[in-house]
């Protein structure tokens, strides 16, 4: 019999106080269910979008997780048991499973897919070749349609998705403005990612800094919302485009938040605003992967990782990501 530790959601978290909302439980696993696959978790991905799943809100893009249930997230690991011939035991796979030693998934529901284990660093399946990269590519290329020479602004620019948006924007010929919190992050944006302008929202007036962009911002990749969005809206170029990928400033709220104070600028500047959610693009993953893999193999696309070790460290990792203390992608190594 196999023992399995997992994180259980016991109550809705208050802010970043995850230790009072979750408990680490242990169970004995039986055989894998019909048509299911069991993955021995190697890495867990810490993603801000899952924060809404922990609230009681029913108006999100996914129903809230039930209290008393296992926490769900993106997992990478090797298949330990399988009742699906497409997923042989021993193969490396990625999909939406549980924060656990072993993640059980119905492949077509969990978006489970086999991934290339020959790359030098398999963590890049959570990075330059992962869903954050798919999100960045879809947002910049498909939703925003960023063009060479245009100004592309990115909030949370030093985070997992934002850092990839910066790089993809540059690769597509855009001039990139990265908005991030703190001098260290802005140095990273300039020195490592090559952004044209880095704005430190903790120590600079974002609206004033953007006002110096000649012609205004043509395309804006939104990860944050709140005050950052209000600073960007009056500095958009006429007929500019905004892709709303995330609103992390409000993810921990148990109820809907007030809209942007500068909402009128959408009309005044004739802006096009579109929300998008990467599961809507999952069927196009192989298509997106082609340019991403080409750039990665050429050394043009990178991801910096902040890695925590051990399943017990998951809550600390998640709090680090949600508080914005990281640069790049936060992951948890569960097993070697």
Image: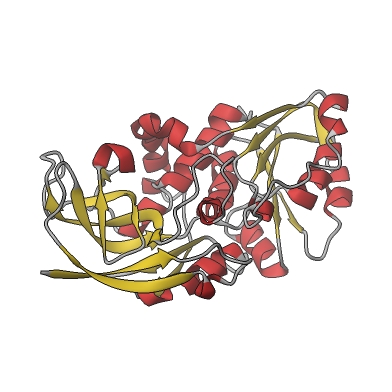
Left or right of 230, for residue 224: left
Closer to the camera in the image, 317 or 259: 259
Foreground: 69 or 82? 69
The quarter holding residue 239 reads top right
Residue that appears at 59% across and 48% down: 57
Q: Quadrant of the C terminus?
A: bottom left
Side of 19 where 177 appears, left or right: right
Q: Is residue 111 visible?
A: no
Q: Quadrant of residue 238?
A: top right
The vertical placement of 313 against 324, above or below, is: below
Question: Foreground residue, 19 or 236?
Answer: 19
Query: In this view of the protein, can residue 246 be seen by the observer?
Result: yes
Residue 203 in percent (x, y) is at 82, 65
Q: Is residue 301 left or right of residue 75?
A: right
At x 55%, y 62%, the residue is 12
Quadrant of image for the N terminus: bottom left
At a point 32% along the width and 43% down the height, the residue shown is: 110
């Amino acid at each position: 019999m196999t023992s399995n530790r997992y994180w259980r959601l016991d109550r809705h978290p208050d802010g970043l106080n995850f230790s009072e909302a979750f408990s680490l439980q242990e169970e004995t696993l039986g055989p894998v269910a019909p048509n299911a696959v069991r993955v021995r978790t190697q890495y867990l991905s810490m993603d801000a979008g899952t924060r809404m799943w922990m609230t009681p809100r029913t108006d999100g893009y996914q129903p809230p997780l039930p209290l008393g249930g296992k926490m769900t997230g993106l997992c990478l690991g090797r298949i330990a048991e399988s009742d699906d011939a497409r997923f042989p035991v021993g193969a490396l796979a990625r999909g939406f499973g549980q924060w656990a030693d072993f993640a059980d998934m119905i492949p077509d529901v969990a978006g489970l897919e086999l991934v290339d284990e020959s790359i030098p660093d398999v963590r890049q399946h959570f990075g330059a070749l992962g869903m954050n990269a798919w999100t960045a590519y879809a947002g910049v290329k498909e939703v925003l349609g960023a063009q060479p020479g245009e100004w592309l602004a990115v909030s949370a620019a030093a985070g997992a998705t934002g850092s990839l948006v910066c790089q993809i924007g540059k690769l597509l010929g855009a001039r990139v403005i990265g908005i991030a919190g703190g001098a260290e992050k802005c140095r990273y944006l300039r020195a490592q990612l090559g952004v044209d302008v880095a704005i430190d929202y903790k120590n600079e007036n974002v609206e004033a800094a953007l006002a110096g962009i000649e012609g205004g911002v043509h395309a804006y990749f939104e990860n944050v919302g709140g005050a950052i969005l209000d600073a960007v809206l009056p500095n958009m170029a006429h007929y500019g485009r905004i892709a709303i990928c995330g609103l992390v400033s409000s993810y921990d709220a148990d109820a809907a938040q007030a809209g942007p104070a500068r909402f009128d600028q959408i009309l005044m500047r004739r802006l096009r605003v579109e929300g998008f959610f990467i599961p809507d693009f999952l069927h196009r993953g192989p298509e997106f992967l082609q340019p991403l893999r080409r750039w990665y193999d050429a050394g043009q696309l990178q991801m910096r990782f902040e890695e925590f070790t051990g399943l017990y460290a998951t809550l600390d990792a998640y709090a680090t990501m949600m508080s914005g203390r990281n640069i790049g992608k936060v992951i948890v190594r569960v097993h070697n």
